Image: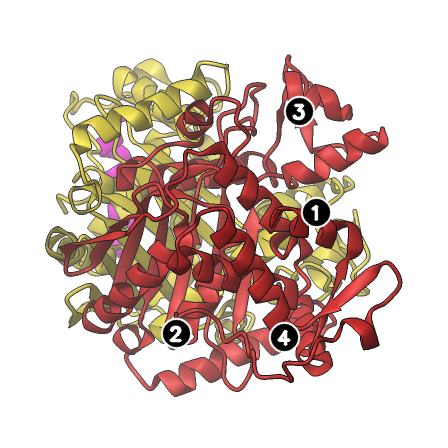
Chain colours: A yellow, B red
């Protein structure tokens, strides 16, 4: 538990609902967010350990105003639980596979608990070897990767994580889905500052984004998808149902997405995005697959003083922010400060009602 | 030496020049290519070990019709030698930094020899730990990364390599150069086939490509560069001299490029692209910096039989090629087959003359 990012739950226990809600929203403290998510998950039969682990990352998402990975995710988690394939009380099994490799079989449970137990071993290993990997197998994975990266980077290591998803994305030059939205995330421990963290899908955009265009009947921007012949398409329904989404960055993004399939699939003995979608069999559940996380302990790499090397990295960040460009997680950290200063977050009322209904 | 890709030098020693040259070109056997490059380098004072190592990757580039990394590179290598900063007889120093980490101080020599000695230790390490890293420090690096990746993957491991270069590329949302063209390369050992290999710059295009547009006075395509205010520019001179190049894939490519700076720079105690350009001080030499190479031994990761996992990877490749999309190195492997079947490659006569003049 202590490996998850510091959510800072130390603020007045009193409900913020009555005082601070903005129109159409209900203000909830982070405690309340966490407790509501926890209650829903345990009500739906999830074990306390899993419910706790998932409620933590959902609270972190809401705190950072990553709304799609905040309370909104309670709904898709619930769908996955109702679908039935996820094991509600799975106990992750750790295997020490070598000096630099630990694998965790999530036993078809959600990934968070598997990460929590596996990341402790990963950190022990990397302190001994300099570089180490954690592979999580057979997990249902729905969350962003940044909470995991952040949890590791807090311990002074650099970390890289990748996972496949469901095959919705065509390779460059193709027309049929092969890749998932395949996220990749990386983190670097900074001096006296939030860490440097990126976490992005290797698809041009999230599938949910295209679904929003479909609902509103708008044309997609170029470069998001192709039709069944592999020709550029701006029609959301065509892209979602007959053609395929595209990766970001053309053939380079396509190559990266292939690497993610390989390292977080066959390398670790787990499913590719195509296999995962086949297993889902139309249920629309959170993807079941593997994940790879690589950690680097800087103490082993730098011939000199790593304190100085960290200053060198700070100069790199300054050369980016000093010209008005943004670092990847900057908005998220600003939102975090705001949420922590306010002591509450704003949950849209319809979403809150949908979540509360899950308790009936 | 045995770690470098198999260049297959076993063909008739007889010169191909008289029989097979196409107009404006001279046909050379791969032996002749190798020997000419070797002679130029030793003539310019490079030690036999370095000359051999570099001639091998240049021959591999020419064989695969990667012309910019073939004989053409003899010229820029020679410029770097004449510039004087590169140490011609540097003896790489290996440091065993931990069970999973080996570093090689190239002692300001070219990178190839450092890779050859370091990669042997990397392979020993990864067979013991499951994941291991090689960091090369203080090297002059001019070659593509695929020959190194291919040399590792021949031993049944997956491998990932990254290096910074000279800071010519602005971060997304910026206007001033921070990143190098920062290449990333990855390889996966395939069953009964050439390996899966990609190797691409994280800049939108190579700097040389923009220089070609400048020479011919053509407008650049959108997305390659910005002016001094960070606004899109299609003027090659503006992009090269006042503004900056851009990364591929917008803010995602920019994030990846940042990761490469960090992992192949401060993590391993070596220079960022900005520092490397400062050291160059206008000489226009090959960049001096570090490189990181990560190897994965699949035997440690897969809970089951890795033979089956490799078949799973083959299905992924089939799902790409089966719909007419290309795998990244496919063209290169076809060119290789052609060169090996012919027994010779075609060198443009002006290039050959320029190279031969270096022997005077």
Do dots 2 and 3 share one subunit? yes
Q: Position of residue A258 (x, y in %)?
A: 53, 63
- Give the CA distance from mark 4 to mark 3: 40 Å
- In screen coordinates, is A354 left or right of A214? left
Q: Are marks 2 and 4 in contact (CB under 8 Å)?
A: no
- From the image, tell me which residue sits under label 4: B319
Residue shown at 53%/86% (left/top)? B192
Q: Main secondary structure of the magenta part?
A: helix
Q: Are marks 2 and 4 on the same chain?
A: yes
Precedes in sequence: disc 2 or disc 3: 2
Q: Describe the element under mark 1 as helix, strand or loop.
A: helix
For the point 66% across and 24% down, the residue is: B240
**Which residue, given by chain and number where applicable, does mark 2 sit on?**
B2
Badge 2 element: loop
Q: Is residue B160 above or below residue B13?
A: above
What SS does tag 4 mark?
A: helix
Is residue A30 magenta-colored? yes
Judge depth for marks 4 and 3 and give the one in front.
Answer: 3
Q: Tell us which disc is closer to us: 1 or 3.
A: 1
Q: Please say if the residues under marks 2 and 1 sit with CB atoms less than 8 Å apart.
A: no
Is label 2 or label 3 in front? 2
**How far apart are the two marked residues, 4 and 1, measured between alpha carbons?**
45 Å
Question: Which residue sits at x=47%, y=68%?
Answer: B150
**Mark 1 residue crowding within 10 angstroms, few (<14) / some (14–19) / many (20+):** few
Residue A267: x, y in percent? Answer: 38, 72
Q: Would residue B128 appear left or right of A275 to someone viewing this image?
A: left
Label 3 SS: helix
Q: Which residues are magenta?
A: A28-43
User: Seen in the image, is B20 located left or right of residue A201?
Assistant: right
**Mark drawn on residue B354:** 1
Q: Which residue is mark 3?
A: B240
């Amino acid at each position: 538990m202590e490996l998850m990012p510091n959510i800072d739950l130390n603020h007045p226990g009193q409900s913020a609902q009555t005082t601070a809600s903005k129109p159409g929203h209900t203000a909830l403290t982070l405690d309340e967010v966490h407790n509501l998510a926890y209650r829903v998950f345990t009500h739906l039969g999830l074990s306390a350990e899993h419910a706790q682990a998932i409620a933590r990352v959902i609270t972190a998402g809401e705190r950072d105003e990553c709304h799609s990975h905040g309370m909104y995710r309670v709904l898709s988690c619930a769908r996955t639980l109702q679908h039935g394939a996820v094991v509600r009380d799975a106990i992750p099994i750790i295997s020490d596979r070598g000096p630099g490799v630990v694998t965790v079989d999530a036993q078809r449970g959600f990934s968070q608990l598997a990460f929590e137990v596996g990341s402790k071993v990963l950190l022990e290993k990397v302190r001994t070897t300099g570089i180490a990997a954690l592979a999580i197998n057979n997990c249902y994975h729905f969350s962003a990767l940044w909470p995991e990266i952040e949890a590791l980077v807090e311990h002074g290591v650099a970390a890289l994580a990748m996972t496949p998803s469901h095959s919705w994305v065509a390779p460059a030059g193709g027309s049929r889905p092969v890749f998932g939205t395949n996220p990749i995330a990386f983190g670097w421990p900074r001096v006296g500052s939030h860490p440097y963290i990126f976490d992005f899908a290797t698809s041009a955009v999230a599938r949910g984004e295209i679904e929003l265009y479909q609902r509103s009947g708008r044309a997609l921007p170029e470069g998001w998808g192709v039709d069944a012949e592999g020709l550029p398409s701006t029609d959301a329904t065509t892209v979602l149902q007959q053609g395929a989404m595209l990766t970001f960055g053309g053939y380079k993004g396509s190559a990266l997405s292939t690497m993610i399939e390989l390292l977080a699939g066959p390398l670790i003995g787990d499913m590719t995005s195509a296999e995962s979608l086949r297993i889902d069999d139309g249920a629309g559940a959170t993807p079941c697959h593997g994940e790879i996380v690589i950690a680097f302990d800087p103490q082993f790499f730098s011939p000199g003083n790593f304190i100085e090397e960290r200053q060198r990295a700070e100069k790199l960040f300054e050369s980016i922010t000093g010209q008005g460009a943004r670092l990847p997680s900057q908005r998220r950290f600003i939102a975090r400060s705001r949420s922590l200063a306010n002591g509450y977050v704003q949950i849209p009322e319809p979403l809150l009602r949908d979540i509360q209904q899950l308790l009936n």
